[in-house]
Every structure is written in C-alpha cells, then in structure tokens.
Amino acid sequence: MMLVIPLLAGQEVGVAGIAWVLAKAALLVVATVVFGRVVVPSLLAVVAGTRRRELFLLAVLGLGASITWLATLAGLSLALGAFMAGVALADSDYGYQALAGRAAAA
C-alpha cells in the first residue's frame, strides 16, 4: 500500500512508474533478507562477543539507520526502510537482544 500512495494522492503515475517502484521495492526486500541472513548475524556475533552494551546498541542503530538510508536513496519511504531494517535485525540470532538493548554472551 505504501508504494501506491502517489496514486492515492491523485498524482499522475503511469504503469511504468508503478512497475519501477515495485521493482525497486522487490530488490530492497531481497537484498535486506540476504543481508539479514548472511551479514547481520556474523556482525552482531562479533559485536556481542565484546560484551559491551554501548557497542552493541551502536551496531544495531547503525544497521537500522543504514538500511533505512539506503531505502530512501532508492526512492522508497523512510517507513518502509525502517520496517526492512527491523526485518533484517529480527531475523538474526540476536534479535531479542537487539530489542532489549543488551548484548548476550557469544
């Protein structure tokens, strides 16, 4: 629904424009899922191994902000980028620790 908001606002958007936005969103979803399953768990394992709460919190915030920023660069909304960042972080083994804001033992 968030991708078709320009249509609901009454802006003239052609079929090619809708297809382009949907393609970018699909690419972002695939990239985020792959990133969340390959890179994020190993990165958070290294950061959690330091057993420093501040560093773990900074890593989680940095990952979330980075994914959200990449979504805005692709022309998608901040809300969709933040959602995809949450998906990437929640999909890792450290999702509950990220929600609690603390690092667990590696």
Image: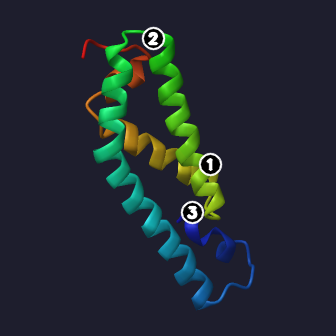
**Which is nearer the N-term, disc 3 or disc 1?**
3
Disc 2 marks a residue whose amino acid type is: Arg
Considering every residue shown, the one lying at the far bottom of the view is 15
Q: Which secondary structure lies at badge 2?
A: helix
Q: Look at 30% across and 26% down and name the residue there.
A: 45
Residue 48 placement (x, y as % from top left): 35, 18
* Local crowd size for mark 2, using a 10 Å CA cut-off: few (<14), some (14–19), many (≥20): some
Label of residue 69 in the image: 1
> Quarter-wise, where is residue 99 in the image?
top left
* Local crowd size for mark 1, using a 10 Å CA cut-off: few (<14), some (14–19), many (≥20): some
Report the residue marked by disc 2: 53
Q: Look at 47% across and 44% down and name the residue there.
A: 85
Q: Look at 24% across and 17% down and name the residue there.
A: 106
Residue 27 placement (x, y as % from top left): 44, 67
Q: How is the image coloured?
A: rainbow
Q: Are marks 2 and 3 in contact (CB under 8 Å)?
A: no
Residue 1 placement (x, y as % from top left): 52, 66
**Vertical placement of residue 23 versus 13, above or below:** above
Label of residue 2 in the image: 3
**Which is nearer the N-term, disc 1 or disc 2?**
2
**Vertical placement of residue 78 versus 3, above or below:** above
